[in-house]
Image (cartoon, helix red, strand yellow):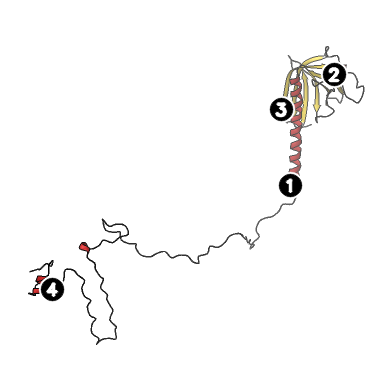
Protein backbone atom coordinates (compact mmCIF):
# COMPACT_ATOMS: atom_id res chain seq x y z
CA UNK A 1 0.00 0.00 0.00
CA UNK A 2 1.43 3.34 -1.00
CA UNK A 3 2.31 5.75 1.78
CA UNK A 4 0.07 8.82 2.11
CA UNK A 5 2.28 11.92 2.03
CA UNK A 6 -0.59 14.39 2.36
CA UNK A 7 0.24 17.27 4.66
CA UNK A 8 -1.64 17.27 7.98
CA UNK A 9 -2.61 20.71 9.30
CA UNK A 10 -3.73 21.75 12.76
CA UNK A 11 -7.20 23.32 12.99
CA UNK A 12 -7.89 23.61 16.72
CA UNK A 13 -6.37 22.65 20.08
CA UNK A 14 -8.15 22.66 23.45
CA UNK A 15 -6.15 21.75 26.58
CA UNK A 16 -9.05 20.31 28.58
CA UNK A 17 -12.12 18.35 27.52
CA UNK A 18 -14.24 15.68 29.24
CA UNK A 19 -15.53 12.37 27.91
CA UNK A 20 -18.80 10.80 29.16
CA UNK A 21 -20.46 7.43 28.81
CA UNK A 22 -23.87 8.05 27.33
CA UNK A 23 -26.99 5.90 27.52
CA UNK A 24 -28.63 4.68 24.32
CA UNK A 25 -30.79 7.15 22.51
CA UNK A 26 -34.30 6.97 23.93
CA UNK A 27 -36.03 8.66 21.00
CA UNK A 28 -35.38 10.33 17.67
CA UNK A 29 -35.49 13.76 19.27
CA UNK A 30 -31.75 13.71 19.95
CA UNK A 31 -29.36 13.41 22.89
CA UNK A 32 -29.70 15.35 26.14
CA UNK A 33 -26.66 16.22 28.28
CA UNK A 34 -28.87 16.24 31.39
CA UNK A 35 -29.14 12.43 31.10
CA UNK A 36 -25.37 12.05 31.54
CA UNK A 37 -23.44 12.04 34.77
CA UNK A 38 -21.77 15.39 34.13
CA UNK A 39 -20.00 15.45 37.52
CA UNK A 40 -18.37 12.06 36.83
CA UNK A 41 -16.55 12.19 33.47
CA UNK A 42 -15.07 8.90 32.26
CA UNK A 43 -11.93 10.58 30.94
CA UNK A 44 -10.34 14.06 30.81
CA UNK A 45 -7.55 15.21 28.55
CA UNK A 46 -6.55 17.30 25.53
CA UNK A 47 -8.37 17.57 22.21
CA UNK A 48 -6.92 18.34 18.76
CA UNK A 49 -8.62 18.80 15.42
CA UNK A 50 -6.39 18.12 12.42
CA UNK A 51 -7.07 18.07 8.69
CA UNK A 52 -5.51 15.82 6.07
CA UNK A 53 -6.86 16.40 2.60
CA UNK A 54 -10.64 16.53 2.76
CA UNK A 55 -10.85 14.61 6.05
CA UNK A 56 -10.84 16.11 9.54
CA UNK A 57 -9.83 14.18 12.66
CA UNK A 58 -10.90 14.75 16.27
CA UNK A 59 -8.12 13.37 18.45
CA UNK A 60 -8.32 12.86 22.21
CA UNK A 61 -4.85 12.67 23.79
CA UNK A 62 -3.32 12.45 27.23
CA UNK A 63 -2.30 15.88 28.58
CA UNK A 64 1.17 14.80 29.69
CA UNK A 65 2.30 11.97 27.43
CA UNK A 66 0.29 12.81 24.30
CA UNK A 67 -0.86 9.20 24.02
CA UNK A 68 -3.90 8.81 21.78
CA UNK A 69 -7.03 7.86 23.72
CA UNK A 70 -9.59 7.92 20.87
CA UNK A 71 -10.02 9.31 17.37
CA UNK A 72 -13.07 10.30 15.30
CA UNK A 73 -12.59 10.71 11.53
CA UNK A 74 -15.02 13.33 10.17
CA UNK A 75 -15.94 13.30 6.48
CA UNK A 76 -18.71 15.93 6.65
CA UNK A 77 -20.12 18.44 9.11
CA UNK A 78 -22.80 18.59 10.28
CA UNK A 79 -23.28 14.85 10.01
CA UNK A 80 -23.58 11.63 11.92
CA UNK A 81 -20.01 11.72 13.27
CA UNK A 82 -20.50 14.93 15.31
CA UNK A 83 -23.94 15.77 16.72
CA UNK A 84 -24.88 18.55 19.16
CA UNK A 85 -27.13 17.80 22.13
CA UNK A 86 -30.53 19.43 22.38
CA UNK A 87 -30.20 21.05 25.83
CA UNK A 88 -26.71 22.66 25.83
CA UNK A 89 -24.14 24.26 23.55
CA UNK A 90 -21.12 22.85 25.44
CA UNK A 91 -21.74 19.15 24.79
CA UNK A 92 -21.59 16.97 21.69
CA UNK A 93 -21.88 13.29 20.78
CA UNK A 94 -19.07 11.96 18.57
CA UNK A 95 -18.49 8.61 16.93
CA UNK A 96 -15.00 7.22 17.56
CA UNK A 97 -13.30 4.40 15.61
CA UNK A 98 -10.51 2.01 16.56
CA UNK A 99 -9.13 1.49 13.06
CA UNK A 100 -10.47 -2.07 12.78
CA UNK A 101 -13.97 -1.15 11.65
CA UNK A 102 -15.45 -0.89 15.12
CA UNK A 103 -17.01 2.35 16.42
CA UNK A 104 -18.71 3.71 19.53
CA UNK A 105 -20.58 6.87 20.56
CA UNK A 106 -19.26 8.95 23.46
CA UNK A 107 -20.17 12.27 24.98
CA UNK A 108 -17.71 15.20 24.62
CA UNK A 109 -17.97 18.25 26.87
CA UNK A 110 -16.16 21.59 27.24
CA UNK A 111 -15.79 23.53 30.47
CA UNK A 112 -16.14 26.89 28.66
CA UNK A 113 -18.64 27.99 26.00
CA UNK A 114 -15.85 29.73 24.06
CA UNK A 115 -14.04 26.39 23.64
CA UNK A 116 -17.16 24.73 22.27
CA UNK A 117 -17.65 27.67 19.88
CA UNK A 118 -14.07 27.28 18.54
CA UNK A 119 -14.63 23.55 18.11
CA UNK A 120 -17.76 24.19 16.04
CA UNK A 121 -16.19 26.94 13.88
CA UNK A 122 -13.05 24.90 13.13
CA UNK A 123 -15.11 22.08 11.64
CA UNK A 124 -17.39 24.46 9.72
CA UNK A 125 -14.48 26.36 8.13
CA UNK A 126 -12.73 23.18 7.04
CA UNK A 127 -15.72 21.69 5.26
CA UNK A 128 -16.63 25.06 3.74
CA UNK A 129 -13.16 25.02 2.16
CA UNK A 130 -13.71 21.42 1.00
CA UNK A 131 -16.96 22.46 -0.68
CA UNK A 132 -15.32 25.39 -2.48
CA UNK A 133 -12.49 23.19 -3.70
CA UNK A 134 -15.01 20.68 -5.07
CA UNK A 135 -16.90 23.40 -6.95
CA UNK A 136 -13.68 24.75 -8.48
CA UNK A 137 -12.68 21.26 -9.57
CA UNK A 138 -16.05 20.77 -11.28
CA UNK A 139 -15.76 24.10 -13.09
CA UNK A 140 -12.27 23.23 -14.34
CA UNK A 141 -13.48 19.84 -15.52
CA UNK A 142 -16.37 21.43 -17.44
CA UNK A 143 -14.07 24.00 -19.04
CA UNK A 144 -11.57 21.37 -20.13
CA UNK A 145 -14.33 19.17 -21.60
CA UNK A 146 -16.03 22.02 -23.49
CA UNK A 147 -14.78 22.69 -27.05
CA UNK A 148 -12.50 25.69 -27.26
CA UNK A 149 -13.47 28.58 -29.49
CA UNK A 150 -10.98 29.52 -32.18
CA UNK A 151 -11.12 33.31 -32.34
CA UNK A 152 -7.94 33.77 -34.39
CA UNK A 153 -8.06 35.34 -37.87
CA UNK A 154 -7.77 33.02 -40.81
CA UNK A 155 -5.42 33.79 -43.67
CA UNK A 156 -6.78 36.72 -45.68
CA UNK A 157 -9.62 37.39 -43.24
CA UNK A 158 -10.28 41.00 -42.30
CA UNK A 159 -12.60 42.79 -39.91
CA UNK A 160 -14.53 46.02 -40.38
CA UNK A 161 -15.38 48.27 -37.46
CA UNK A 162 -18.11 50.91 -37.73
CA UNK A 163 -17.72 53.74 -35.26
CA UNK A 164 -20.91 55.74 -34.96
CA UNK A 165 -21.76 59.15 -33.54
CA UNK A 166 -18.67 60.78 -35.05
CA UNK A 167 -19.47 63.91 -37.12
CA UNK A 168 -17.06 65.35 -39.63
CA UNK A 169 -16.04 68.90 -38.88
CA UNK A 170 -17.33 71.36 -41.46
CA UNK A 171 -14.86 73.88 -42.84
CA UNK A 172 -17.41 75.95 -44.83
CA UNK A 173 -17.55 79.60 -43.81
CA UNK A 174 -14.21 79.57 -42.06
CA UNK A 175 -12.77 83.07 -41.82
CA UNK A 176 -9.38 83.55 -43.52
CA UNK A 177 -6.60 84.76 -41.37
CA UNK A 178 -5.38 88.31 -42.16
CA UNK A 179 -2.16 88.46 -44.13
CA UNK A 180 0.58 90.98 -43.67
CA UNK A 181 1.67 93.02 -40.70
CA UNK A 182 -0.37 95.18 -38.37
CA UNK A 183 -0.64 98.93 -37.94
CA UNK A 184 2.31 100.96 -36.72
CA UNK A 185 2.06 102.30 -33.18
CA UNK A 186 1.16 106.00 -32.79
CA UNK A 187 3.96 108.50 -32.22
CA UNK A 188 4.85 109.49 -28.67
CA UNK A 189 2.48 112.02 -27.11
CA UNK A 190 -0.44 111.22 -29.39
CA UNK A 191 -3.78 110.52 -27.83
CA UNK A 192 -5.41 107.17 -28.52
CA UNK A 193 -7.68 107.27 -31.54
CA UNK A 194 -6.61 110.84 -32.51
CA UNK A 195 -4.39 112.54 -35.12
CA UNK A 196 -1.83 115.25 -34.29
CA UNK A 197 -3.01 118.55 -35.84
CA UNK A 198 -0.51 120.77 -37.67
CA UNK A 199 0.99 123.69 -35.71
CA UNK A 200 -0.81 127.05 -35.74
CA UNK A 201 -4.09 125.57 -36.80
CA UNK A 202 -2.77 124.73 -40.26
CA UNK A 203 -4.88 122.41 -42.30
CA UNK A 204 -3.56 120.46 -45.19
CA UNK A 205 -5.69 119.40 -48.08
CA UNK A 206 -4.47 116.29 -49.79
CA UNK A 207 -3.68 116.78 -53.42
CA UNK A 208 -5.99 115.01 -55.79
CA UNK A 209 -4.10 113.17 -58.49
CA UNK A 210 -6.17 112.32 -61.51
CA UNK A 211 -4.48 109.67 -63.56
CA UNK A 212 -4.14 110.67 -67.19
CA UNK A 213 -5.78 108.52 -69.78
CA UNK A 214 -3.47 106.56 -71.97
CA UNK A 215 -5.41 107.69 -75.05
CA UNK A 216 -5.47 111.48 -74.36
CA UNK A 217 -2.00 112.40 -75.57
CA UNK A 218 -2.95 115.90 -76.82
CA UNK A 219 -5.12 117.04 -73.96
CA UNK A 220 -3.69 119.81 -71.79
CA UNK A 221 -2.56 118.96 -68.26
CA UNK A 222 -5.07 119.60 -65.48
CA UNK A 223 -4.94 122.94 -63.79
CA UNK A 224 -3.21 123.02 -60.45
CA UNK A 225 -5.40 123.50 -57.45
CA UNK A 226 -4.94 126.78 -55.56
CA UNK A 227 -2.69 126.42 -52.56
CA UNK A 228 -4.25 126.72 -49.17
CA UNK A 229 -0.99 127.60 -47.46
CA UNK A 230 -1.53 130.58 -45.12
CA UNK A 231 2.14 131.65 -45.47
CA UNK A 232 1.74 132.48 -49.15
CA UNK A 233 3.84 131.60 -52.15
CA UNK A 234 7.49 131.42 -51.18
CA UNK A 235 8.58 131.71 -54.80
CA UNK A 236 7.38 135.30 -54.94
CA UNK A 237 9.03 136.27 -51.67
CA UNK A 238 11.92 137.97 -53.46
CA UNK A 239 9.79 140.13 -55.82
CA UNK A 240 9.53 143.97 -55.51
CA UNK A 241 5.74 143.95 -55.39
CA UNK A 242 4.55 146.67 -53.10
CA UNK A 243 1.30 144.88 -52.57
CA UNK A 244 2.97 142.02 -50.72
CA UNK A 245 4.91 144.40 -48.49
CA UNK A 246 1.83 146.31 -47.48
CA UNK A 247 0.02 143.26 -46.09
CA UNK A 248 0.35 143.07 -42.36
CA UNK A 249 1.43 139.84 -40.67
CA UNK A 250 3.38 138.57 -43.61
CA UNK A 251 6.99 137.65 -43.37
CA UNK A 252 9.27 138.82 -46.16
CA UNK A 253 12.31 136.70 -46.92
CA UNK A 254 15.39 138.40 -48.48
Q: Determine which residue is flagged by label 2.
A: 33
Residue most extreme to the top: 40
Marks 1 and 3, how far apart in space?
A: 31 Å
Quadrant of the rendered image containing residue 253 = bottom left
Q: Secondary structure at mark 3?
A: strand
Residue 9, labelled with which disc? 3
Residue 27, labelled with which disc? none
Marks 2 and 1, how far apart in space?
A: 50 Å
Mark 2 or mark 3: name the one nearer the start of the chain.
Answer: 3
Mark 1 or mark 3: name the one nearer the start of the chain.
Answer: 3
Q: Residues within 10 Å of mark 1 (few under 14, many from 20)?
A: few
Q: Nearer the viewer, residue 251 or 46?
A: 251
Q: Secondary structure at mark 4?
A: helix
Q: Residue at x 76, y 48 (%)?
A: 145
Q: Residue 127 vs residue 168: left or right?
A: right
Q: Secondary structure at mark 1?
A: helix
Marks 4 and 1, how far apart in space?
A: 116 Å
Pointer 2 with pointer 3, Cβ within 8 A: no
Q: Determine which residue is flagged by label 1.
A: 143
Amino acid sequence: MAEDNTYESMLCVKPEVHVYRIPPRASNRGYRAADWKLDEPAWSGRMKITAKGKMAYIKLEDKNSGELFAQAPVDQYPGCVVEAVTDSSRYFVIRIEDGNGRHAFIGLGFADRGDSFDFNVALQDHFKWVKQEGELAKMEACESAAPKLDLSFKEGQTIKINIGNIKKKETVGAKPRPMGGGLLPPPPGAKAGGVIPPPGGQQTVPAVHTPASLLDFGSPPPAALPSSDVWGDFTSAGSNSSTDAEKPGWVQFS
